[in-house]
Image: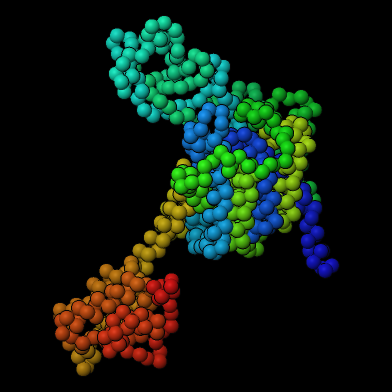
Amino acid sequence: MTEFVRKRVANAKNDILSGLTVALALVPEAVAFAFVAGVDPLVGLYAAFMIGFITSIFGGRPGMISGATGALAVVMVSLVAEGNAMGDPGEELGLYYLFATVILMGVIQMLAGVFKLGKFVRLIPHPVMMGFVNGLAIVIFLSQLGMFKEGEKDVFGNDKYKTESVEKKFEIRDDNKVYDVTTDRAVFNFDSNRLEEINSNEGKYMVYEGQVFDLITKEVTFNFEDNAIYSINKKGKVKSWIPTNELLLMLSLVLLTMLIMWGLPKLTNKLPEALLAIVVVSAIVILGKLDVATVGSFIRDGGGEGLKGGLPKFQFDIFSKIPMNWETFKFIGPYALILAAIGLIESLMTLNLIDELTETRGNSNRECLAQGGANIITGLFGGMGGCAMIGQSIINIKGGGRTRLSGIVAAVTLLLFILFASGLIEQVPIAALVGVMFMVVIGTFAWSSFRILNKIPLADAIVLIAVSSLTVFFDLAVAVIAGVIMSALVFAWENARRIRARKHVREDGTKIYEIWGPLFFGSIQAFNNKFDVANDPEYIEIDFIESRVSDHSALEAIFNLVGKYEEAGKRVKIKHLSEECQALMIKASPRLASVIEHDIDDPRYHVMAKAMK
């Protein structure tokens, strides 16, 4: 018992300090991802707390940090928007559809764990893993650049939005009237940059810089292009770089943070460099009364009211506002499936990376169960769902966090920030947290990939670059799935070319085909081309001693080949098939029992057609 306790507390100091650092880094990340998804910051913060706490206790990888992530948030944007459109303005129905989707997402993830699908992460090739790491490092870097920008204002002083034209609604004709394209009736007069009621000449809309604003709500409602008015999709806020002086000050603080994190380990390993860097830079900003962006200003600029909140509450409104019927399932089902896939892929890939960094092995199926259970609880208590966070996980590992305690400390500390220390945490400068994340980028990116790029096979190099690019331009799930498919196709093609046949004729006139190389769906055509049924002698022997029959396609190819020889009136014998292969062929056609020869040195292996049963 003493030994058990000693092992658990040996790393307690590093776990606690690393957990505190992670908690600070989680705040702007969770808030930013909540804004991306179009929900209140507390929804993201609650998700970070609940996901992080539950997976730290029950997950399959001690030291791995989970919370609200950008990969999931970008999918949630359209879900929330479509959900809001189903209800009355101000009802925020999209938020409750999001909670219901997160619950279903958790159920899917738990089923993946129950059926032990997590083990398939082992099939992910190393070039895909390296591309995943590089792509995520670039994504983290690009996301931090947004911290150096500020939102632009429109003509009414409100946040300016990027808008995308969707459908043509009105057109302006030569008589300076605005016609509805559906009814072909004039609905407004067009005077300079204003749309006025035809009878009263009362202004209803104003055109400014290609956008049409409602003069009552002061919000952009349409796009104006080529004398036509289009409905719109909002694509996020328009941002521009902050003024030069502010930019230089912020860059200086970021570089100071990075310098402390780089230099401190060279002096001592007993202090957590990330936490100390945040404390030092925060002290400089607070005591020097520097006018820079802080956690508090970041939340308020995004439309939030601050960090302070209460404990998460059970969301009974999910079951009263959302109809539990087939239509709802059809709406949230595809989103839940995509979110579950992205969440599991990112979590299991991060688990693999932490395994490599710590030279230990996590439990992928247990992680699937923990992620699923955490998302179910999070959805029920008003969180936006989440998965493993590679950036925060690396901060934790680099800071010395190794056990479940580090993740628990991070989650509990985040909750304490929300409940009691919001005023203090809101004073932390964004520059300090950006500096920490830049150091994470440097530590995450596989710089060795540049050195080995011209030394590895061309196909692997293409996969590595493709996965990195797809992670940046699309999302993690698309990148990893595409990378695995590309690697699988390359593997199948390379193995398909290895099928060979040695041919010779014995003294008794029997022609021998000695097959070597894998026989599977990819090599069937090359296999069939080895035989000359029309010109072969009467007696044929096919020897598979150096070949392996891998799947149903291979069995079918052998079966068809025997049929062709028999139709040509020739006798064929097959040797050295595995017992399982023999049994499957005889079961398919009992007459093959006289064709297949049994021998004591027959190989032993499974055929996929049988192994999958």
Answer above or below: position of 176 versus 376.
Answer: above
Q: Position of residue 137 (x, y in %)?
A: 56, 45
Q: Quadrant of the C terminus?
A: bottom left
Residue 481 appearing in the image: yes
Answer above or below: position of 259 versus 530.
Answer: above
> Which residue occupies 15% across, 79% down?
534
Residue 472 appearing in the image: no
> Which residue occupies 24% across, 90% down?
506
Q: Position of residue 267 (x, y in %)?
A: 78, 47
Splitting the image into 4 quarters, where does residue 305 fall? top right
Splitting the image into 4 quarters, where does residue 484 fall? bottom left
Query: What scheme was used to colour the molecule?
Result: rainbow
> Which residue occupies 39% across, 61% down?
490
Front in this rendered view, residue 88 or 238 = 88
> Which residue occupies 36% across, 76% down?
549
Number of marks present in the image shown: 0
Q: Position of residue 349 (x, y in %)?
A: 56, 55
Q: Position of residue 309 (x, y in %)?
A: 72, 35
Residue sitting at the far bottom: 508
Front in this rendered view, residue 81 or 269 = 81
Front in this rendered view, residue 395 or 475 = 475
Residue sitting at the far right: 2
Q: Quadrant of the N terminus?
A: bottom right
